[in-house]
Amino acid sequence: MASGNEVLTSGGYIKHHLTNLTFGQKADGSWGIAHGAEEAAQMGFWSIHLDSMAWSIGLALIMFFVFRKVAKGFSVDKPGKLQLFIESIFEFADTSAKDGFQFANVYIAPLALTIFCWVFLMNLMDLIPVDWIPEAFVAAGVPYMKIVPSTDINVALGLALAIFIMILYYSFKEKSPWGFFLELTTHPFSAKEFGIKSSGAQMAMNAILYPLNFVLEVVSLLAKPVSLGLRLFGNMYAGELIFILIALMFSGGWLMLSEGGYLSGTLLALGGGMLQIVWAIFHILVITLQAYIFMMLTIVYLNQAHEHGDH
Amino acid sequence: MNINATLLGQTIAFLIFVWFCKQYVWPMMMGPIMERQAKIADGLAAAEKGLKDQEMAADNAEQAIKQAKAEAAEIVAHAKARDTQMIEEAKAKASEEAGRVMAGAQAEIDQEINRAKDSLRTQVSELAVAGASKILGKEVDAKAHKAALKELIEQI
């Protein structure tokens, strides 16, 4: 009975931690918060994850609040510790944008800064022990609360979609729609590169190659935002899942202790505690790295969107 | 794990944040940072200029010292030359004076000699007259033998 119960509770626990607070239209036509993942799924596209939106926007607002506060109290001669810290972040973003982006665009450096800091802050929520905030909200009557926005695929893909829009915007703007279309069709294969000299044969060859190029290039173009979003989501989601499993292991140890399995219970609880520390330390690296990768790839993609001609 | 409107909400929020950051946050921070960088660059340039100035001042000072030394040496040499000249002048003056004194003394001596000679001559003539009168036993008229006496005196 105990084991069956445990599987059920473990499953339920994981499911609870991975369910967003979803607001949408219920099956009966009324609008409200979904109770359970199934109901949330039934709400379809026109529903919204209140927790993801609130936490992500809240973090961004905190971030901008701190930035503006530091900027207003900026001291050229006697910078404080916070100011130096914020300054180093700004200069880091500025340097990254200057190194990776060869064109003149005033948006790139602020974009890099926003991405790096925002993604980092969203990822940072992963280091808060998995039970604290959700349990507090459950106690307050809110059924679900997922506090790490970047473990929500909508958030990760939403960021990637914004990047994709920028890529398209700058591609159209910098290369003109026709130039962009040409870039998509004439690369990577062209009859010239196969050493075909006569123009007739070239045209015949290109008639086959250009559609092929177009398909390849469109796929690679679409792959950019998809990989960008899924990389962040995958890393964070997996990290979160492991935190949840570690938490389960820890509480499983306590359960065993309470049922008289002293040795195994102690080992499990201690092991869970140790793992939590190790994984959290490792995760500090992961969340920073993911924020950095997201920022750098954005810069690189936008640089490509500005590039003209052959490459 | 459902794709829903959160995606669009996130995209819109993100685009707004990027715009907001570019418009209000980035310039507010980077402006002063650039200002400070300019200030630091200016400060470094000023420090470098100060070092150069100092070097130049040191050079100038060295040159001034060199010149002063040369001048001093010249003055000393000049003084030495003047010294010797003065000594020489004094010596010349002294020897000239000595010569004059000597000449005066010589002239006096000569005069004395002549005077002695003169008195000797008269005495000789008197003696000669006295001697002759003694020998002849009678008065010799000096006037009568004036010519002979004069010849005699002149022979002495």
Image (spheres, helix red, strand yellow):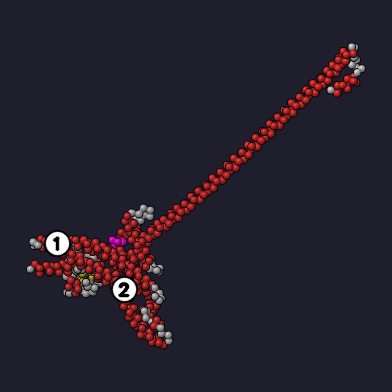
Asked if residue A11 lies left or right of residue A127, the reply is: left
List x then y, in percent, for residue A245: 18, 66
List x then y, in percent, for residue A232: 27, 69
The chain that hosts pointer 2 is A
The chain that hosts pointer 1 is A
List x then y, in percent, for residue A200: 41, 88
Query: Residue visible at 78% across and 25% down?
Result: B110
**Residue situated furthest front in the rendering:** B135
Q: Nearer the viewer, mark 1 or mark 2?
A: 1
Mark 1 element type: helix
Mark 2 element type: helix
The answer, for residue A223, to whether it is visible in the render is yes
Query: Residue visible at 32% across and 55% down?
Result: A81
The foreground one among A291 and A79 is: A291
The foreground one among B99 and A140 is: B99
- Disc 2 designates what residue? A224
Q: Is residue B142 found inside the magenta-colored segment of the image?
A: no
Asked if residue B70 lies left or right of residue A50, the reply is: right
Query: Residue visible at 53% across and 48% down?
Result: B60
Q: Given the image, on which type of amino acid does mark 1 rest?
A: Leu
- Disc 1 designates what residue? A267
Question: Which quadrant, please, contains the C terminus of chain A?
Answer: bottom left
Q: Which residues are magenta?
A: A60-64
The foreground one among A219 and A252 is: A252
Q: Given the image, on which type of amino acid does mark 2 rest?
A: Lys
